[in-house]
Image (tube, grey):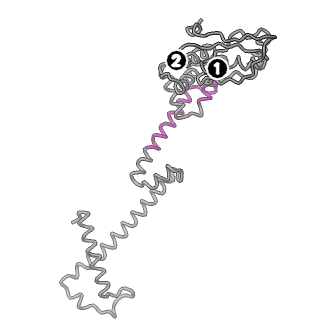
Amino acid sequence: MNEYDHRTRDLAAETQGGPMINTQEREHHPVAALFPMLSEDELEEMAADIKARGLLQDIVLDQQGRILDGRNRYEACARAEVEPRFTTYDGEDPDGYALSVNIARRHLTKGQQAMVAARAWLVSNHTARSAANHVGVSHARVVQASTVLQHAPDLADAVVAGAMGLDEAYRIARENKTKADSAESQLARLRTEDSELADKVVEGELTLVGAWAERKARAAEEERQRRVATHLLCEIVPALAQTEGTATFARYDPSEALPGRAITREVIARAAAALDEMARTWKERDLS
């Protein structure tokens, strides 16, 4: 008898004229539901045994009528058309009870047990260390299983079923975590350089790779425009400055002007305005 047995009480009802088969669908307690059901062959074998010898161990319910222990027995009773018997757990830790009794009767590896404990940690009031103690595995293994649940959740069922070891799933989860961390840092950097592109990534309009490719193209275009603007100013302004104090203005001959480049009073006014803008910009940028 384990520490929980003395906390249960018998709820089997007396019937008249023979037993009536209980066909009520019962909800499973969240922790109990973490454990996989038996295979079809195993359920049929259990049903045949119950039909021949009856239900030897009561099905345990919590205070809300959910199955804490005995989901397979309950299913086998339905198949064998045998009325199940129930007891209700009357203790203060139904999560721990469901975890302990279900682990105890299953032949699970430490990796499988750790994954069940990690899942129980998420759906119960237990800490990771408490869940680990209930199933008899180290806290470190439960933390590894938790990492799988966070960064490779599609592998958790395979670990519980025994199709994949926890070590292999944990390795993949760590790789996924590293990629995710890298992606987060790249997204943060993109946001500082181009918040518009970062928003498109978050909204699913662009992939992170696509956003960085567009950012690279934009940066290249910005560099090209800076180069063109700089060369243009370097060609025009120094040449204009060299005309100060000379007779250049007096020698201007409209008939010799290049096509489309004739100088009028309007052009001179716009050139003066441009130089004023340039002077203000240089002052703002603190350029000598």
The residue closer to the viewer here, 5 or 201, is: 5
Q: Label 1 belongs to which residue?
A: 67
**Residue at image location 28% in from the left, 77% down from the top:** 273
Residue 195 falls left or right of residue 38: left
**Residue at image location 48% in from the left, 18% down from the top:** 130
Quarter assignment of residue 21: top right
Give the magenta range.
156-184
The location of residue 180, given as percent across then percent down, is: 48, 40
Magenta part mainly helix, strand or loop? helix
Q: Secondary structure at mark 2?
A: loop
Q: Secondary structure at mark 1?
A: strand
| Location of residue 250 with respect to 57 vertically, above or below | below
The residue closer to the viewer here, 79 or 197, is: 79
User: Which amino acid lies under the numbered mark 1 shown in the image of this protein?
Assistant: Ile
**Residue at image location 54% in from the left, 31% down from the top:** 149
- Residue 225 badge: none
Which tag, 2 or 1, sits closer to the chain's start?
1
The location of residue 69, given as percent across then percent down, is: 63, 17
Separation of disc 2 and disc 1 at Cα? 25 Å
- The quarter of the image holding the C terminus is bottom left
Q: Label 2 belongs to which residue?
A: 137
